[in-house]
Amino acid sequence: MNHASAALLLAILASATHFWDPTVGIFASAGHARSVSRVWLAEALKTLDQSRCADAPAVEDVQATIIASYLAYNMQGYSAQFRLLQTTALELARQASLHKTDAPQQHHHQHPPRDLVADEVKRRVWWHIVATDWLLAFTSGPQEGTYLVQPRHMSIAHPRHAFDNALLDTPLPLATAPTTMSFALLRLRFATICRTIADALPPGCPGI
């Protein structure tokens, strides 16, 4: 297993342990589960550091960082670690060129066949990061009224409104039937409204 995949697995274990269900058993108490979760999180962050030193960023690096950031938020609130991990996820996504997933390919270069499922995963990951960035522009704090991702600085389609096992089928209209992507797409729609409001406010506005 490479560093990126290991970091993703560790982040998932840390998150699952933090939200442990007492009916499942395994841990003696919620406190015990949370202490184990902190160990998993520390190992995930350590492995992410090793991954960044050893390899070019992969989608798994970005996914692991996103999960770690939300776990940090649930443990600490809107902390410096949460903000750092959110910014790190965005920078890793850019280095992995997720924002160029649907950019026209140069014809004079040889390109392998497109992996449609992998491309869809990239869209989901990228737009999740973007939505979080725009939502934070509408949240009280030092970042209020500002965001990092410009919509004109990317070439990537929105995720498809489809079930995970039907990614290659014709996507469903968002208003017709719920899928596993309904919440993510509605979250993105709301985040876009937040970004529009942030753009419309005069500089130095005291609050949103």
Image (tube, grey):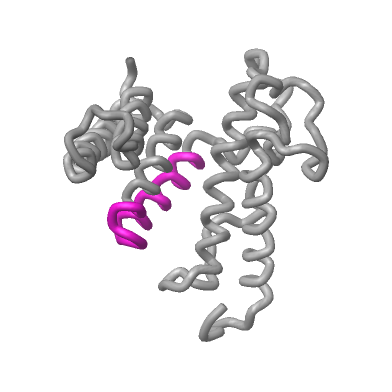
**Principal secondary structure, stretch drawn in magenta:** helix
> Residue 181's image quarter?
top right
Nearest the viewer among 204 and 73 is 73
Instruction: Indicate yes or no whether the magenta region holds residue 86.
Output: yes
Task: State which quarter of the image contains the C terminus.
Answer: bottom right
The residue located at (42%, 51%) in the rendering is 86
> Residue 50's image quarter?
top left
The residue located at (54%, 36%) in the rendering is 97
Residue 91 location in percent, x, y? Answer: 44, 46
Residue 106 location in percent, x, y? Answer: 70, 27
Nearest the viewer among 131 and 59 is 131
Q: Say left or right for 86 vs 149.
A: left
Q: Is residue 6 visible?
A: yes
Nearest the viewer among 193 and 162 is 162
Q: Say left or right for 68 vs 95.
A: left
Residue 123 location in percent, x, y? Answer: 62, 36
Q: Say left or right for 161 vs 173.
A: left
In the rendered structure, which segment of residues is drawn in magenta? 73-94
The residue located at (23%, 34%) in the rendering is 40
The residue located at (33%, 15%) in the rendering is 1
Above-or-below relation of 41 to 143: above
Nearest the viewer among 173 and 208 is 173
Q: Is residue 52 visible?
A: no
Instruction: Indicate yes or no whether the magenta region holds residue 92.
Output: yes
Residue 111 location in percent, x, y? Answer: 64, 17
